């Protein structure tokens, strides 16, 4: 074994340039993969975080049909009380808030717009959504009963209102009655994302319930968790809480996780992943071909040498092991240097950020900032290079099998 | 001179097949590289085409004309007069193929069950059809018959949300120029399905004259949308409209109306080239390696040629021609395979399993790869230019061999 290892090592450096070119191909590919995968995972993480922390949260409890149809009568009875129950069940880690949603025609002195009005608990809303923190004029809602409203910047512009102005709402209540209310604009939210700034309209939950004749009910309990991997256990616990409570069990409620709430998110990530892996697969195949070529050459040019070794009693399996070992050493070099350099590059960019001209518009569409920050993790460092490694080792199989067909005498005579 | 190059060409060709396994492997590498360059570009083009086409369909038109304040404040107050005079004439000139004048205001639609905020479009159905912005998939009923049609056409998804259906009445509410609530009841005469379900919830079509009457806005309109059926050529004719419309109106091409679409197009061209170069770099290691080996195992032979008086330039030529053969054969195979594989997928690739994710990018659930001659040309240029550049070093090294040393090398 030892002799084989020494032989393999020496053989590699008989053709320094060829070895380095082959290792170079692996290093190049690995640097690229580490960088791109870090960038991808970083942007996915950010995409998920930004999208979920904006409004929808990680989990919501709703009436079973509400998510699909969004009808006012598909409500959650005693919603604030349920939020308290959930808060108690999930402990300190989880942030919980209750909401109600209604459609209304909002009119200022000069303009009228149909808007989606959200009734929120001022005290808890800022823990589940980033909007309250993005107020850039005025303040966020304070009292749960006050006739106050916070709206997005574009909506404010369209309605031609500023902080201190009044808005009138006309809609229909839960019982089908005519619902109307007047609220003062106390704050304006500017997120920079046009779709959000056009849509946000939040009022205190208690006032909302009064105006829309909702009683104690609302439409959702929103739960924001510290990390994605705590979603599954939380969903299981909530389902048990709902099932165990005799009143809640009969209310037709369901627990929805972020995949259901934002179905596009996971699919966008999946499709991006697929197209990215198409590109990675091409790169990895190219590298594998490169290794195949090198190893085949190195086997063919050593035919005479191998013939002698066979004649001296070396078993073909040992020769195959030799070729495998050579490939292994090259792959290790390629992987080690590739991961090191790629990791350094990604690590540097994870602090300084990465920018591709013209990308801002696309980034906005997916709730991403203009600058991208790769996320270096064990997974992003090793995922790509491990497959390159595997590909290189597989590529050595064909050259190695040729050794088993060698006849010592004929091989020694080969030119 | 000619004869010696012919010899070089012949020699290079024969050298190629002395080690046919190596040649075949490197050919496979180049072929795979070239194929992926073209195939990937075609997929990306298809994707971007689709996004742009969907985007232009909802805009609609490649050029839009509004009252200056309309885009910031899309209210009935910021309206404009119907085109006349020079403006009307410019709309009739080639390459403009169609234009439509529309009323477009935010509104509320209510059924007896529910209400929703929508965008009310007051349209001239024949002009919309010419523009290509009339809904092309009416699942129930009919589209509007004329500007005076009193009915409305709504999206299937909106109908479901409102729990209403064909033939039922709904109420439209918006504001008139005096900021009074303007409303009218209307019957649903058609229900459409859109390529992007999101737009079904937003757009409600009504006759233009009927809408103008409801909003008490006289003959005023909100926008004029113009198309020449080629979104890439918009810069060539947009100035004509700009000039003819006069200073009172805002005239913008789609690149300014939807910056997301135009940046997609801009980024894409750059990205295709980056991808091609990256793929090339990955395969260049193999290419250089092959040439280095080919030179290395022929050191004695090259030494002999030099000793016999062959000019170093011809040695360089020989290696370069050998490389050119490899690149040429690989390119030919790669292009053919790319062409065949893209043609085979011409009917579209079904990506409906990620349809909602695609909708975030305004894409439909079927992806049509778009083969462009320019992409084939670009990949060929990248491979030949960079390929020959990469081959220069081994070629130059071969030509600098010392004949005596080379001849005696074992």
Image: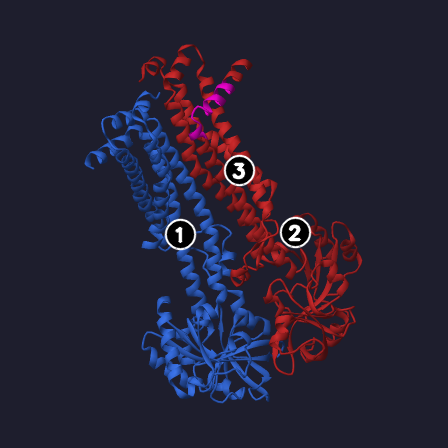
In the rendered image of the structure, the colour used to display chain B is red
Answer with left or right where residue B311 lies relative to residue B368.
left
Q: Position of residue A415 (x, y in %)?
A: 35, 20
Chain letter behind tag 1: A
Residue wearing tag 1: A37
Expressed as whole percent of the image width and height from the top left, the position of residue A287 reads 40, 40
Give whichever of B232, B180 is nearer the camera: B232
Secondary structure under tag 3 reads helix
Chain of the residue under label 2: B
Q: Is residue A243 left or right of residue B252?
A: left
Where the C terminus of chain B falls, by quadrant?
top left
Visible in this render: residue B116? yes
Residue that carries the numbered disc 2 in the rendered image: B231
Residue at 70% from the left image edge and 79% from the top image edge: B168
Q: Which residues are magenta?
A: B8-23
Question: For residue A27, which quarter of the picture?
Answer: top left
Q: Which residue is mark 3?
A: B334
Would you say residue B20 sits in the magenta stretch? yes
Q: CA distance from mark 2 to mark 3?
A: 31 Å
């Amino acid at each position: 074994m030892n002799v084989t290892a020494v032989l393999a090592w020496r053989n590699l450096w008989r053709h320094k340039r060829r070895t380095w070119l082959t290792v170079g191909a692996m290093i190049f590919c690995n640097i690229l993969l580490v960088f791109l995968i870090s960038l991808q995972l970083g942007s996915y993480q950010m995409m998920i975080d930004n999208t979920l922390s904006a409004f929808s949260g990680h989990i919501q409890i709703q009436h079973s049909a509400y998510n699909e149809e969004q009808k006012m009568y598909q409500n959650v009875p005693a919603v604030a009380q349920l939020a308290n129950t959930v808060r108690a069940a999930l402990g300190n880690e989880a942030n919980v808030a209750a909401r109600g949603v209604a459609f209304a025609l909002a009119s200022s002195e000069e303009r009228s717009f149909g808007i989606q009005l959200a009734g929120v608990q001022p005290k808890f809303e800022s823990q589940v959504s980033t909007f309250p923190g993005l107020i850039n004029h005025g303040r966020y809602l304070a009292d749960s009963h006050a006739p106050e409203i916070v709206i997005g910047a574009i909506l404010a512009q369209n309605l031609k209102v500023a902080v201190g102005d009044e808005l009138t709402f006309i809609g229909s209540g839960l019982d089908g009655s005519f619902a109307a209310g007047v609220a003062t604009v106390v704050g304006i939210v500017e997120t920079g994302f046009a779709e959000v700034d056009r849509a946000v309209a939040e009022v205190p939950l208690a006032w909302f319930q009064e105006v829309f004749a909702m009683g104690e009910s609302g439409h959702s309990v929103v739960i924001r968790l510290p990390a994605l991997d705590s979603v599954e256990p939380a969903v299981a616990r909530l389902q048990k809480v709902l099932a165990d409570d005799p009143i809640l069990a009969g209310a037709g409620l369901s627990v929805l996780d972020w995949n259901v709430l934002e179905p596009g998110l996971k699919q966008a990530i999946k499709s991006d992943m697929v197209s990215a892996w198409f590109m990675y697969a091409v790169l990895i195949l190219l590298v594998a071909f490169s290794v195949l070529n090198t190893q085949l050459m190195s086997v063919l040019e050593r035919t005479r040498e191998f013939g002698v070794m066979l004649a001296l009693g070396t078993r073909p399996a040992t020769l195959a092991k030799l070729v495998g070992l050579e490939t292994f050493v090259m792959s290790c070099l390629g992987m080690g240097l590739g991961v090191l350099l790629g990791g350094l590059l990604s690590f540097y960019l994870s602090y300084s950020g990465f920018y591709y001209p013209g990308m801002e518009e696309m980034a906005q569409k997916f709730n991403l900032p203009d600058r991208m920050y790769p996320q270096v993790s064990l997974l992003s460092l090793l995922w790509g290079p491990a497959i390159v490694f595997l590909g290189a080792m597989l590529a050595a199989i064909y050259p190695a099998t040729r050794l088993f067909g060698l006849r010592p005498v004929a091989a020694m005579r080969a030119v | 001179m000619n004869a010696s190059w012919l010899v070089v060409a012949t020699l290079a060709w024969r050298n190629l097949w002395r080690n046919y396994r190596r040649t075949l492997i490197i050919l496979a590498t180049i072929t795979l590289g070239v194929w992926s360059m073209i195939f990937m570009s075609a997929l990306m083009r298809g994707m971007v085409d689709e996004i742009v086409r969907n985007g232009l369909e909802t805009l609609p038109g490649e050029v839009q004309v509004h009252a200056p304040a309309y885009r910031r404040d899309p209210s009935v107050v910021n309206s404009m007069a119907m085109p006349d005079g020079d403006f009307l004439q410019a709309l009739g000139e080639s390459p403009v193929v169609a234009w439509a004048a529309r009323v477009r205001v935010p509104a509320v639609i209510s059924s007896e069950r529910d209400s929703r905020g929508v965008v009310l479009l007051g349209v001239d159905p024949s002009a919309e059809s010419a523009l290509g912005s009339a809904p092309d998939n009416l699942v129930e009923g009919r589209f509007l018959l004329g500007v005076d049609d009193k009915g409305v056409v709504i999206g299937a998804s909106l109908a479901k949300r409102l729990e209403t259906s064909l033939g039922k009445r709904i109420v439209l509410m918006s504001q008139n120029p005096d900021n009074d609530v303007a409303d009218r009841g209307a019957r649903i005469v058609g229900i459409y399905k859109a390529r992007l379900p999101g737009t079904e919830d937003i757009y409600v079509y009504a006759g233009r004259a009927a809408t103008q009457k409801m909003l008490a806005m006289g003959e005023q309109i909100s926008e004029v949308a113009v198309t020449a059926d080629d979104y890439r050529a918009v810069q060539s004719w947009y100035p004509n409209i700009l000039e003819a419309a006069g200073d009172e109106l805002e005239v913008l091409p789609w690149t300014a109306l939807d910056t997301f679409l135009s940046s997609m197009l801009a980024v894409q061209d750059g990205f295709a080239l980056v991808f091609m170069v990256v793929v090339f770099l990955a395969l260049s290691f193999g290419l250089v390696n092959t040439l280095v080996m080919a030179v290395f195992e022929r050191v004695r032979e090259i030494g002999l040629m030099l000793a016999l008086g062959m000019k170093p330039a011809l040695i360089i030529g020989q290696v370069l021609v050998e490389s050119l053969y490899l690149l040429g054969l690989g390119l030919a195979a790669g292009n053919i395979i790319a062409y065949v594989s893209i043609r085979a997928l011409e009917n579209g690739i079904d990506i409906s399993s990620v349809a909602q994710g695609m909708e975030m990018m305004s894409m439909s659930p079927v992806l049509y790869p778009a083969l462009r001659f320019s992409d084939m040309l670009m990949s060929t240029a990248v491979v030949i230019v960079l390929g020959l550049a990469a081959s220069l070093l081994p070629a130059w090294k071969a030509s600098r061999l010392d004949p005596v040393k080379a001849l005696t090398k074992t």
